[in-house]
Image: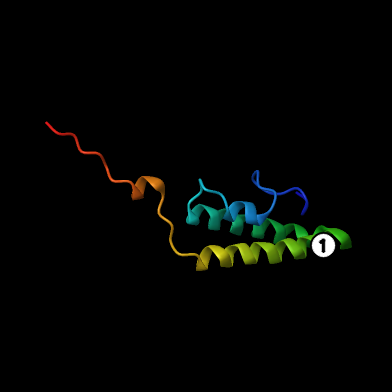
Amino acid sequence: MSAHYGYAGFRRPADIVSDNVLSDKQKTETLLHWKRAVARLMPFASDDEREAYRNLTIELAAALTHIDIVPVRLHSFETTPLKTTKP
């Protein structure tokens, strides 16, 4: 994994935050997993790559903060009332 290739199909942490399919919990879990992977790989990276990992760590922290402070969003199935059938 490189700091420049993204993670789990997402190029940047902001892409995960703006995803409309994942729940906030799934976004948080994905960002935390990415952050842990970066922390494990950073000590073995070259100096240039290490700087990219540091910047990515800052982006990940900002994305996690954004998820924490954004009001709870309901999924579409929770906001649309169920249709009742009349006998």
Q: How many marks?
A: 1
Seen at 65% across and 62% down, the residue is 60
Task: Report x, y in % for residue 6.
Answer: 71, 49
- Residue 41: image x %, image y %? 75, 57
Considering depth in this image, is 1 or 26 the residue closer to the camera?
A: 26
Q: Is residue 76 above or below residue 57?
A: above
Q: Residue furthest top?
A: 87
Dot 1, how many residues are within 10 Å of its Cα: few (below 14), some (14-19), or many (20+)? Answer: some
Judge left or right: residue 5 versus residue 31.
right
Q: Position of residue 33 (x, y in %)?
A: 61, 55
Q: Is residue 4 left or right of residue 81?
A: right
Q: Is residue 36 above or below residue 11?
A: below
Q: Is residue 7 above or below residue 48?
A: above
Q: Residue at x 51, y 68 (%)?
A: 69
Give percent across and percent down for residue 26. 51, 52
Q: Specify whether 22 is left or right of 79.
A: right
Question: Circle 1 sits on which residue?
Answer: 50
Residue situated furthest right in the rendering: 47
Residue type for callout 1: Arg
Q: Secondary structure at mark 1?
A: helix
Question: Does 27 sit left or right of 39 as displayed?
Answer: left
Q: Residue at x 48, y 52 (%)?
A: 23
Q: How is the image coloured?
A: rainbow
Quadrant assignment for the C terminus: top left
Q: Quadrant of residue 59?
A: bottom right
Residue 42: quadrant of the picture: bottom right
Along the line of sight, the residue nearer the viewer: 61 or 29: 61
